[in-house]
Amino acid sequence: MPKKSGFKELAKFYNNYNFIEYRTPEITDEYMDKLNENINMLIELAMPSMLNLMPKYRNEFDISGSIFEELTKKLVKKDRLYKVQENLRPLYGSKILEKVVEKDPQRGPIINQFLKGLVGTPVIGQKF
């Protein structure tokens, strides 16, 4: 049976996300555990949820922005969403993500492209 994917699962990703340094990481076992947990949540919660929710918002100009707006109404605080988005931004195209892509050549490029779409979407009110 496929896992459920929707707002509650997407909220789990944002609310349980581990903040780590992607620009100049100090690679330790703890760091890699947090990175792997983030990647697993991205694959298991964020990706299927966003893909499942997108058709509902297909007539919106900014599909991802509309999903984020709905998500922050009750499930995730806006500040938390902004901070996760900002923390994820340097992961896209980073050396550390290259290692993830090398380890998982089947899903790695999909993760990279999904991150590009996810962090490339500014959330209303988000500062850059």
Image (spheres, helix red, strand yellow):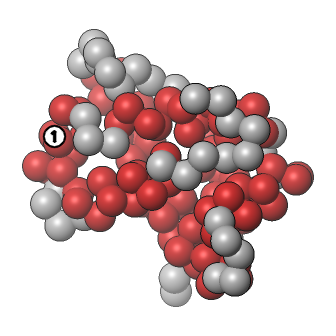
Identity of the residue drawn at 48% across and 64% down? 47
The one nearer the camera, 1 or 118, is: 118
Location of residue 107 in the rendering, given as x and y in whole percent from the top left corner: 25, 64
Identity of the residue drawn at 67% across and 71% down? 61
Name the image quarter holding residue 100: top left
Identity of the residue drawn at 48% across and 49% down? 120
Callout 1 crowding tier (Cα within 10 Å): few <14, some 14–19, many ≥20: few
Horizontally, residue 99 falls left or right of residue 15, namely left
Location of residue 119 in the rendering, given as x and y in whole percent from the top left corner: 49, 46
Extreme residue toward the front, this view: 61
Horizontally, residue 58 falls left or right of residue 34, namely right
Q: Name the kind of residue labelled 1 in the image.
A: Lys
Is residue 25 visible in the rendered image? The answer is yes
Q: How many marks?
A: 1
Is residue 44 placed above or below 88 in the rendered structure? below
Is residue 54 placed above or below 32 in the rendered structure? below
Is residue 60 placed above or below 66 in the rendered structure? below
Horizontally, residue 113 falls left or right of residue 77, namely left
Name the image quarter holding residue 27: top left
Location of residue 97 in the rendering, given as x and y in whole percent from the top left corner: 25, 40
Name the image quarter holding residue 24: top left
Residue at which label 1 appears = 99
Horizontally, residue 21 falls left or right of residue 57, namely left
Extreme residue toward the right, this view: 74
Identity of the residue drawn at 52% across and 86% down? 1
Location of residue 99 in the rendering, given as x and y in whole percent from the top left corner: 16, 40
- Give the quadrant of the C terminus: top right
Q: Label 1, secondary structure: give it.
A: helix
Is residue 9 visible in the rendered image? The answer is no
